[in-house]
Amino acid sequence: MFNHLLSLLIWLPVVGSIPVLLAGAARPNLARWLSMLVAVATFVLSLFLLVQYNADAGGMQLTESYLWIASWGVHYGLAVDGISVALIVMTTFVGILVIAGAWEVIQDKPHLYMAAMLILEGLLIGVFCATDALLFYALFEAILIPMFILIGMWGGPRRVYATLKFFIYTFFGSVFMLIALLYLYQKAHTFDLATLAALPLTFKEQAWIFFAFLIAFAIKVPMVPVHTWLPDAHVEAPTGGSVVLAAVMLKVGTYGMLRFILPIVPDAGAHFAWLIVVLSLIAIVYIGYVALVQEDMKKLVAYSSVAHMGFVTLGIFIAFALVREQGSTDMALLGMQGAMVQMISHGFVSGAMFTCIGVMYDRLHTRQIKDYGGVINAMPWFGFFYVLFAMANCGLPGTSGFVGEFMVILASFAASPWIALFAAFTLIIGAGYTLWLVKRVLWGEITNPHVAEMKEINGRETFVLVAFAAAVLALGIWPQPLVHLMDSSVAQLVQQLAIHKI
């Protein structure tokens, strides 16, 4: 089984969606239980990755490779390093919580909803372990389909607009990525990522390929200024769609940067790192102010995601400057580690925040902040979890939100105190919009009689929120296991930054 563990992880949820679909609308409870069974089995299977993967050795392990398209030399190639393992386990963990969260909420065609979630989970796992560029591209594009369906069928009143904007933005970026891959194939006659990483390229070639990849992955992150599709997608998506989108799908963009930009075009990456650093700082500071004025809770947290993901891109590309200009591999390693920890942390924190908003929306059917106030009086246990996740969103020490951001700020200070100053400023802005949200929603007297009628969280909702809380606190109090899992892989990425192809 362990020889094909990665394939099992990809195809178990995809194939498992078939009996869920066959259960049909006539047997919704059967569809729910089948989907939960598949999600739990996939999560348990992903835990074997932690056992089988040798974190001390690092590098790509658990390799699978089979000839897929012989005439093009395309392989069904899979392998994982520590970063992939962390992202896959997070994906399967979130998959359980998304299905549990939608258990009673999705009443219209629940079998289709659950099946779409399982297919999306399998495709995302495939993205995180593909070692063939064409396979990566196919999965990279395929994840659009189930998300398109989730927003389009169970989304809000402007769901058609949101889905089209989401699809057009991401598909537009993918065209540039495909062009870059075809150019590389003409030179290497293979789509194998390891071979492409060793391919000699002139600076001009690297520059064009860099921007082709950057457009595709920046839209997925999303980075400023191609971020405007995200708030619309979040606002119109059902709660589960928002959770998966924020917790997992955004990470595909930064993961793609690690797998394509860093090893294939290192010289262009180093030359244009300043551009990514500037865009990351704009996301961290400016988008924080944009979040501050939002009146829709989902839109506020969506903009917050753009700001927090700015720390990930900042940590990745500040490492270029530290290695190439200062020769400081230790601080580059710290920055890259911080970016990876922030990726995982943001998955838990943003997923929890959107879940909390969904809990309130299920009761009051509005996301407007002005319609709430005094919620903690009616739902004290819910208020406890909401405040905890809000503190993590602010970057409070002891929560996962602090660890990655602090590591990136320390690394940024080694590159430039001014960069560190702007990066650290987000802690103030983040506290501003998050606490302002909590104050207006949770505290004060109940002014809306419908808020007084809101019922406390039930057992199912408690399970989901406790699971998110456990992840946020565990990573915040004891991040060492996660750092150790990814340490050797991150160190190898940092070594690649120092490689010159020209």
Image: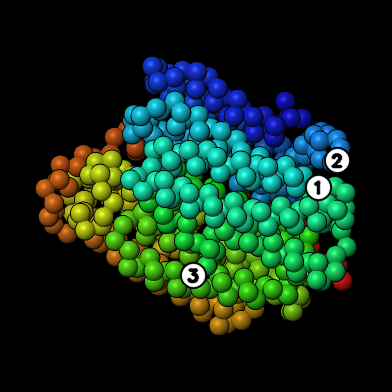
Front-lying residue, 111 or 422: 111
Amino acid beneath label 3: Ile
Mark 2 or mark 3, which has the lower sequence index? 2
- Mark 1 touching mark 2, by CB under 8 A? yes
- In the picture of the structure, the residue carrying the numbered disc 2 is 73
Q: Residues within 10 Å of mark 2 (few under 14, many from 20)?
A: few
Question: Which residue was labeled with disc 3?
Answer: 284
Contact (CB < 8 A) between labels 3 and 1? no
Work out whether residue 112 or residue 374 is closer to the camera in this orientation and state it.
Answer: 112
Q: Position of residue 243 (x, y in %)?
A: 45, 46
Residue 347 versus residue 292 in the image, above or below: above
- Could you say where residue 213 lies in the image, as x and y percent from the top left? 69, 59
Query: Which mark is on residue 191?
Result: 1
Q: Position of residue 64 (x, y in %)?
A: 78, 35
Task: Work out whether mark 1 precedes mark 2 in sequence or the reverse, and give the earlier one.
Answer: 2
Q: CA distance from mark 2 to mark 3?
A: 42 Å
Q: Quadrant of residue 277?
A: bottom right
CB contact under 8 Å: marks 2 and 3: no
Count neighbours of disc 1 (C-alpha within 10 A) and say few if under 14, some if 14 to 19, many if 20 or more. many
> What amino acid type is highlighted by mark number 1?
Phe
